[in-house]
Amino acid sequence: MFWWLYRSPYRVENPSKPWPVILWLQGGPGASGVGIGNFEEVGPLDTNLNPRNSTWLKKADLLFVDNPVGTGFSFVENTSLFVKTDDEAATDLTTLLIVLFNKNEELQKSPLYVVAESYGGKFAVTLGLSAVKAIESGKLKLKLGGVALGDSWISPEDFVFSWGPLLKDVSRLDNNGVKESESISEKIKQQLEDGKYVEATSTWSELESAISISSNSVDFYNFLLDAGMDPVSIATSEISYGISLSKYSKYLKKYSRYLSSLRSSPGGNGGDIDSLMNGPIKKKLKIIPSNISWGGQSDYVFSNLAGDFMKPRIDEVDELLAKGVNVTIYNGQLDVICATRGTEAWVEKLKWEGLQNFQSKARTPLYCGGDKVTKGFIKSYQNLHFYWILGAGHFVPVDQPCVALNMVGGMTQSPAADAL
């Protein structure tokens, strides 16, 4: 497993508020945190290796991990070793944390916050529980500060049912498109009830294709755009990595476009991340085997997790809340794939005893940069916090860097002063 730890140059020593560490988990499954989260979203440098003013290093140290194995620069030499479940991925991540933290007393002083995007949210909640158990048993020496779920694929069923109504409300689907969307969503619901998870993953792809046709290619990461316009998810029409996985071809074709869009995107900075990672970065690192290319095994990561892809992780969120772990949920207003209305739907299914009090709370508006333009809202009760981020799609730190940075500062209680 490949990991990359940045020690922040903005570090503030404050005994009453220890400097935090953020572990960033990318989505996919199969998208690289070391590449995308680091150079496209929150790391110190962009894809042109120019400084990023909104880097999250202003609030915390940053740990990027290419997770699960087969993602980014992480690799397997035996294909039987790809993970098949979110729990297996959590076990690998917990092992990595044990190696990193147990012998480093300086790291142990810093609370660890797991921040996830997209499918990374499922890894985050399974890791959170795995880490808590390892801490309780004395196997892992760290303090878990909390888990943050950014536009996270926690309940696939709730998300697929959100797509039709959302896109109808914003004029990207008409009644015919909504009717078709709801029909395919019902098929997915039945497959999930029958335990046919691989089939549900295939039908998920069928639904995305139907919506793309009916909406004239709406961007699933920002409904204001057409596919191919988003600076972080520029899609290419047909991508193949030259491997044959016919069993999964229906959704792999769609998913390959997602991975490739991230890997070849400029991230708003004009750089090519695939060339960057397999060129200067690989050369500089000096530890990547010559036969390993960044992202070369990504398709296999996804296909091996096809049986877990559509499984919900609401129960795991409930367990974290019950154990007193701080859980932060944040969602971009313009996201489709993990739409806010889908996130709100699965939050309402929580069995957590504080849910009713949380729902009754009023939201507080968020501002940024000294002006009084509403950038979002926050609602908190006990250890559950929900951020609604206005004007952002799936990639919140890219679309709203100022409010995202302030959110991270509040979530981690970073001793750093406001950076923007």
Image (cartoon, rainbow, N blue to C red):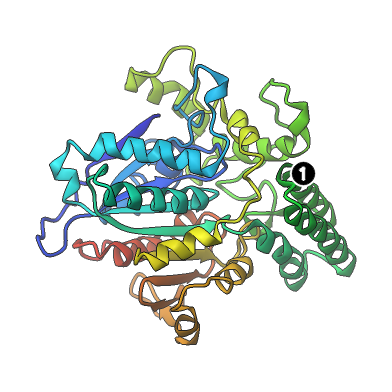
- Horizontal relation, residue 173 to residue 9: left or right: right
State left or right for residue 304 relative to residue 87.
Answer: right
Q: Quadrant of the C terminus?
A: bottom left
Q: Residue at x 44, y 62 (%)?
A: 319
Q: Nearer the viewer, residue 347 or 243?
A: 347
- Residue at 46% in and 54% down: 125
Could one spot residue 175 in this view of the protein? yes
* Residue in the foreground of this view, choosing between 93 and 250: 93
Can you see residue 53?
no
Q: Which residue is found at the position 81% from the left and 61% from the top?
A: 186
The quarter of the rendered structure image containing the N terminus is top left
Per the image, the residue denoted by label 1 is 199
Spot occupied by residue 248 in the image (x, y as percentages of width and height): 74, 33
Q: Nearer the viewer, residue 338 or 86?
A: 86
Q: Is residue 211 above or below residue 411?
A: above
Q: Quadrant of residue 3?
A: top left
Provide residue 236's location: percent of width, then percent of height: 69, 37
Mark 1 neighbour density, 10 Å: few (under 14) some (14–19) many (20 or more)? some
Q: Amino acid at mark 1?
A: Glu
Q: Nearer the viewer, residue 187 or 140?
A: 140
Left or right of 283? Residue 77 is: right
